[in-house]
Amino acid sequence: MSISLGKLAVRFGCELRGDPDTEVDQVGTLQSAGEGCIAFLANPSYRKMLAETQATAVILDESAVEECPTAALITPEPYLVYAHVAALLQPEPPLLPGVHASASIGADCAIPKSCEIAPGVVLGDGVVLGERVCIGALCVLGRGAVLGDDTRMMARVTLYSGVRIGQRCLLHSGSVVGADGFGIAKEPTGAWTKVPQLGGVRIGDDVEIGANTTIDRGAIGDTVIANGVKLDNQIQVGHNVAIGEHTAIAGQVGISGSARIGARCMLGGQAGVAGHITIADDVVVMGRTMVTHSIKNPGVYAGGGVPMDDVASWRKNAVRFGQLDDMARRLRRIEKAVLKPASDDES
Amino acid sequence: MSISLGKLAVRFGCELRGDPDTEVDQVGTLQSAGEGCIAFLANPSYRKMLAETQATAVILDESAVEECPTAALITPEPYLVYAHVAALLQPEPPLLPGVHASASIGADCAIPKSCEIAPGVVLGDGVVLGERVCIGALCVLGRGAVLGDDTRMMARVTLYSGVRIGQRCLLHSGSVVGADGFGIAKEPTGAWTKVPQLGGVRIGDDVEIGANTTIDRGAIGDTVIANGVKLDNQIQVGHNVAIGEHTAIAGQVGISGSARIGARCMLGGQAGVAGHITIADDVVVMGRTMVTHSIKNPGVYAGGGVPMDDVASWRKNAVRFGQLDDMARRLRRIEKAVLKPASDDES
Amino acid sequence: MSISLGKLAVRFGCELRGDPDTEVDQVGTLQSAGEGCIAFLANPSYRKMLAETQATAVILDESAVEECPTAALITPEPYLVYAHVAALLQPEPPLLPGVHASASIGADCAIPKSCEIAPGVVLGDGVVLGERVCIGALCVLGRGAVLGDDTRMMARVTLYSGVRIGQRCLLHSGSVVGADGFGIAKEPTGAWTKVPQLGGVRIGDDVEIGANTTIDRGAIGDTVIANGVKLDNQIQVGHNVAIGEHTAIAGQVGISGSARIGARCMLGGQAGVAGHITIADDVVVMGRTMVTHSIKNPGVYAGGGVPMDDVASWRKNAVRFGQLDDMARRLRRIEKAVLKPASDDES
C-alpha cells in the first residue's frame, strides 16, 4: 500500500518537514532506500549516511533534522515510529483459513473456522484454539494445549501437553514449549532417578518466542511467562521459572530452574541466570553476565567476561588471575610495611 | 491413583509420623499442596514454607520434622523418595500401540506390535525398534537406526542413519542425534574441504536427552554416551566425544570433539569442554566453566566467569584485568625494593 | 570401492612408500584400522599410536614417516589428503530422484526431475530448486525460497519465505534460516512493539550449516553468508549479519545483529560477537571470547573467560577481581611512595 507523509505525521504524532502529499510505499535503510521509500535514523553511528540517502523521507529526531536532505518525519522516538510505519506499509500476509487435508487432528479439539492449520500439523486430543490462530506446517500440539486468539506458530514448533498460550503471540520455528525440566535425584548407587515433571507452562499475551528456544514445563507448579515478554533465539528457560511483563531477553541466554525475573528487565545475549534466585523489576543485565545471586534493586549489572585482547596478552593476564588472591595479600603486606600511618583507615 | 502413607513408608523405607491409613493421591509443593497432596522439603531455602503448608503429608529429613505441621515421611533422601512417590502417583500415560496411517515406513524395518508410531513419523530403511518403543509425531529415524525396548522419542526428534540407542531412553523434542561433526580441512586456496563424517553414535540404556540438544556422529569411530547419562536442553556434543556412566550435564553446555568425560561427573550450565581432553570420573564442573585442559583428579572445578557487579564497577575492574600482568610485575619490583629479606622465600 | 595406493599417490600428489598395487577400501583411525584400511596422522598427540597401527597404509607428513610400520602416503597436508581419500572411498549415498507422495507442494514451484523430495516435506508457493537438490524428510520451505544445484537439506530444516541458498550447500537437521530478527521498539508504556523484519537471507555456494543453528532474516536488507562459510551446530546469527568467504565458526557462537565478519576468519566455540561491529579478514577468535568492539587487524584474539581452577581457589580469586581497580590504585600509591625516581617513566 501507499500512504502520504501527511497522513503518517498525523497518525503517529510526528512533525512533518516537506510536502504532506508525498506518498511512500515501502521502508528502506538510509543506504538502500530509493524513490517511494521511507527510511529512519535511530542509531547515531548511522548518522553519517543521512546526507547521501536517496530515500523519499526519513524518520528522525530533532537533533538530526538539519542534516536531512529529504522530507522528514520528526519524532523523539524514530525507531518506534519506524516500527509502526513498517507494519502499516508491509503487513503480514493474510491468513488462509482452513485445515489442510494432511493435518492430523485429535479427538475433541476446538478449531474455529477462522484458523489456518498448515500441512502436516499434528494436534493431540482436546486442543483448543482461539479465533484466527495460525499453526504453521509440521507443528505438534500436545493433548490439551490451549492457544488464544490471533496467536501464530511458524513451522516446526512443538507444544507439549497442557501448554497454555495467550493472544497475539508469535512462536518461531524449532521452539519447544513444555518439555521436561532437568529434574533428577541421585540413588545411593550413583545412578540418577528421573523426577516426574508434572507442572505446565503458562504464557501470557503478546509474547514472542525465538527460533529453537526451549521453555521447560514446571516440576510441580507451572513455568510462567507474563504478558509482553520477548524472547530471542536459542534461549533456555528452566522449569518453574517466572518472567515478568515486558521483559526482553536476547539470544542464547540460559535461565536455570525456579529463577524469578521481574518486569521490564532486559538480559543481554549469552547471559546466564542461576537457579532459585530473584531479579527485581527494571534490571538490565549486560550480555554474557553470569547472574549468580539475587538482584534486589533496579540498575545495570555486568560480569561474566573479561575484555578481548590479543591472545598472548590475554594468556599472560589470565595466568595472573589465578594469582590474584596472592597478589592482594602481598599488596596488603607491603602497604603495612610502607604506609603504616595511612593504612589504618583501610580494610 | 491413591495410596496410604503406611504403604509409602514401607515401600520407600521411610519412618512415618502420622496415621498410616491416611491416603494421598497427588504431589504438590509446600505452597500449593492441598487435601490429598504429598509435598517434600529438600532445599533448605524452602524450609520457611513448611509451617504454613496445607499438604496432607510432607517428605522430609530428620532435621525438619519438628517444624512439620502435618504427617511426615522421614528419610535422609527426601528428594529421591519424592521422585519415586511422584512416579507412582502420576505415571506416564500408557502407550497406544500401532502405526499411524500417516507414518512413512521404510523397507525392512522391524517394528514390534507393542510400539506406538505417531502421525507423520518417517522411518528409513532397516530401522529396528525394541518392544514398547514410542516414536512421537514427526520424528525422523534414518536408515538402520536401532532403538532398545521401552525407549521413547517425543515429537520432532531426528536420528541420522545408523544411530544406536539402548533401552528406556527418553529423547526430547528438537534433539538431533548423529548429524555430521564439524570436520573441515583447509585447502591451499583458503577454502575448506569437508571431512566425511563416517562414524556413528552409540547411546546406552536409561539416557535422557533434552530438547534441542545435538549429538554429532563420529568422524571415523563412534560418539559414545554411556548408560544412565542425563543431558539437559541445548547441549552440543561434538564428534567422537565419550561420556561415562551416570554423568549429568546441564543446559547449553558445549563439548568439543574427542573430549572424554568420566563417569558420575556433573557439568553446570553453559560450561564448555575443549577438544581432545580427558576429565576423570567423579568430577564436578561449576556452571560457565571453560575446561581447557584435562582434569586428572576428582574434585570441584570452576572458572570461566567473573562475579557480577554494577556495570560501572565491572568496567573499571575489567580494564584492570588487561593490566594484570603489568601489575604483578610492578608488585614484585616493589617487594624487592621494600621487603628484601622477606622476599627470598617467594617465587 | 577399492583403490590402489599408487593411484591415490598420483591423484593427491603424495610420495608413496610401499607397494603401489596394495589396495585399500575404507578409512580408519590409527587404533581401529585393520586390513584394507587407510588411516592418517595429523594431530601430533596421536603419534604414539603410529607404531602399533594395524592399518594397511597411513597418510602422514615427512616428520613421522620413520616411525610408520606400514605403507605410507607422505604429504605436507595429511588431514586434507585424508579428507579427499575418505570422500573417494566412502561417498554419500546416491540421490533417489522423485517427489514422495506425502510431500505437500505449493503452487508454481520449479522442481527438476533430478531432485529428491522426501516424505512429509512442505514447500510453499513459488519455491525454485536447482538440479539434484535433496530435501530431507519433514523440511519446510517457505514461499519463494530458492536453492541452487546439488544443495542438500537433511531432515527437519526450516527455510522461511524468500530465503536464497546457493549451490552444493548442506543444511543439517533442526536448522532454521530466515526467522525474524530480534527487533523490538519500546512504547512509552514500557511495552515492546515488534519491528517488522522485512529483509531476507542470502547464502552463497558450498556453505554448511550445523544442526539447530539459526540464521535470522534481515530487518530491512539481507543477512548475507558468503561462499564457503562453515557453521557448526547451535550457532545464532542475528539479523543483517554479514559473514565473509571461507569463514569457519564453531558451535554455540552467538553473533549479534548487523555485525560484519570478514573472510577466512575462525571463531572458536561459545564465542560472542557484539552488534554493529566489524571484524577484519583473517582474524582468529579463540573459544568463549566476547568480541565487544571491532577488530581492524588480522591476528589471534582471546578474552571472555578466566582459567579453570579448583573451586575454592577460583572463588578467592574471583572475589579479588571485584577489587582490582582498588588494588591497582593502591599499587600506584605505593609505587609513588617507594619508587619515586623510577616511577616517572610509567603511566
Image: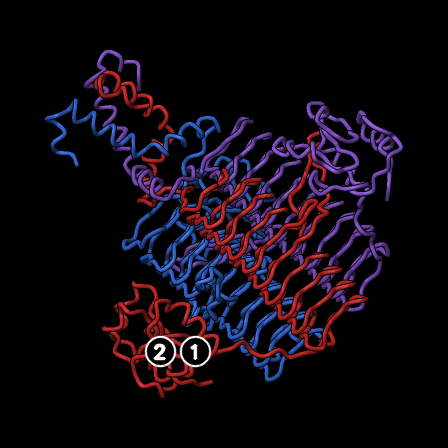
Chain colours: A purple, B blue, C red
Percent coordinates x, y for residue C110 in the rendering: 76, 69
- Tell me if C8 is positioned left or right of C54 in this view: right
Residue C33, disc: 2
Residue pictured at 83% horizontal, 42% vertical = A25
Query: Marks 2 and 1, how far apart in space?
Result: 22 Å
Percent coordinates x, y for residue A48 in the rendering: 64, 32
Residue B105 in view: yes
Q: Is mark 1 on a helix, strand or loop?
A: helix
- Mark 2 chain: C
Residue C11, disc: 1
| Earlier sequence position, callout 2 versus callout 1 | 1
Q: Nearer the viewer, residue B123 or B132?
A: B123
Q: Which of C4 and B284 is in front in this view?
A: C4
- Tell me if B158 is positioned left or right of B62 in this view: right
Quarter of the view holding residue A176: bottom right
- Mark 2 or mark 1, whichever is nearer to me: 1
Percent coordinates x, y for residue A133 in the rendering: 79, 52
Q: How crowded is mark 2: few (under 14 residues within 10 Å), some or many (20 or more)?
A: many
Question: Does mark 1 fall on the same chain as mark 2?
Answer: yes
Q: Measured along the vertical axis of the image, is residue C104 above or below residue C223?
A: below
Residue pictured at 25% horizontal, 23% vertical = A332
Of the 4 image quadrants, the one containing the C terminus of chain C is top left
Q: Measured along the vertical axis of the image, is residue B8 above or below residue A328?
A: below
